[in-house]
Structure formats: C-alpha cells, structure tokens
Image (tube, rainbow, N blue to C red):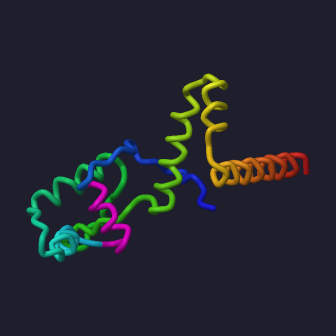
C-alpha cells in the first residue's frame, strides 16, 4: 500500500503537456531537457519545440513536482515524488473534496448506488482503516 508522501507539491493540477513530461521523468528518473525533448520527439507524429520543454519543466518545478541537479552545464531533472505517491495524493485530494459535501445523506445515497465490486472495495477499505486504527491504538498504549 502506497503511503501519502511527507512532501507534497504546491499545486496538484497539471496540464496535459506537464503530465506528459512528468511521465517521461518518472519513466527515466534523471534526464536533461534535451533527453526529455528527444524522448517526446521519438514519436514521428509529434512536434514540440525545445523551448516549450524548458518552459514546462520550469512550471513543474514551480509547482513543486520536479527539481534538478546541475552536472557541469547541464540540468538533470528528477521527480520529487513517485508516480504511486502522486496517485495516492490525487486520490486523497479527490476523496476530501467529495467528503466536503458535508451532507451525510448525499454521501450515503452515493454509496448506496454503487455496484457490488465498488461495495467490496469500500468494505476492504473499511477493514484496513479499522486495522490501522487498532494498530495505532495498541502502539500508543504499549
């Protein structure tokens, strides 16, 4: 089970090109802008200026998704959290937004309308939460 990361990007929302570049970085953790650009252009139907790659990398850095290390004159870009941690953060954010509805009747009506597979997942989540809380309580008592 992927835990929520201690570090969280400043802004979770990403545009399509930001997501594409971040996926390239996740696939190969330390890349220069030139290498990222080359990987995108490996698709013969794709066009993208090197300057656009640099602009998007800077935006991802400002949003807190990536950072770089300088190797000579080259910047090598890397993700600050893993793909799995990002998925966990997004799910956590979406769940909190859903629960902000605040009306238990609406949440219950939504849950009541779920199919059997979803209900099994909710039951598994409830079991995990119960076990985690019991473990936490036991460790605090012991």
The residue sitting at 36% across, 72% down in the picture is 27
97 or 107: nearer the eye?
107
Please tell me whether residue 25 belongs to the stretch shown in magenta: yes
- Where, by quadrant of the figure, is residue 42 drawn? bottom left
Would residue 42 be found to the left or right of residue 88 on screen? left
The residue sitting at 46% across, 62% down in the picture is 82
Would residue 135 be found to the left or right of residue 75 on screen? right
Whether 47 is drawn above or below 141: the answer is below
What is the residue that sits farthest to the right in this orientation? 142
Residue 92 spot, x, y in % from top left: 54, 45
Residue 45 spot, x, y in % from top left: 12, 70
Whether 140 is drawn above or below 96: the answer is below
The residue sitting at 63% across, 50% down in the picture is 118
Please tell me whether residue 2 belongs to the stretch shown in magenta: no
- Decide whether the magenta segment is chiefly helix, strand or loop: helix
Q: Which residues are magenta?
A: 18-30
Whether 103 is drawn above or below 123: the answer is above
The residue sitting at 66% across, 31% down in the picture is 108
């Amino acid at each position: 089970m992927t835990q929520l990361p201690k570090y969280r990007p400043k802004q979770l929302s990403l545009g399509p090109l930001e997501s594409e570049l971040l996926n390239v970085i996740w696939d190969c953790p330390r890349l220069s802008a030139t290498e990222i650009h080359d990987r995108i252009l490996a698709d013969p139907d794709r066009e993208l200026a090197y300057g656009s790659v640099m602009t998007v990398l800077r935006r991802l850095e400002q949003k807190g998704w990536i950072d770089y290390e300088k190797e000579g004159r080259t910047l090598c870009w890397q993700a600050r959290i893993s793909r799995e941690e990002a998925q966990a953060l997004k799910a956590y954010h979406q769940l909190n937004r859903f629960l902000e509805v605040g009306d238990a009747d609406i949440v219950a009506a939504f849950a009541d309308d779920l199919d059997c597979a979803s209900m099994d997942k909710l039951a598994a989540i409830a079991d995990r939460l119960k076990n985690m809380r019991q473990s936490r309580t036991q460790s605090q008592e012991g």
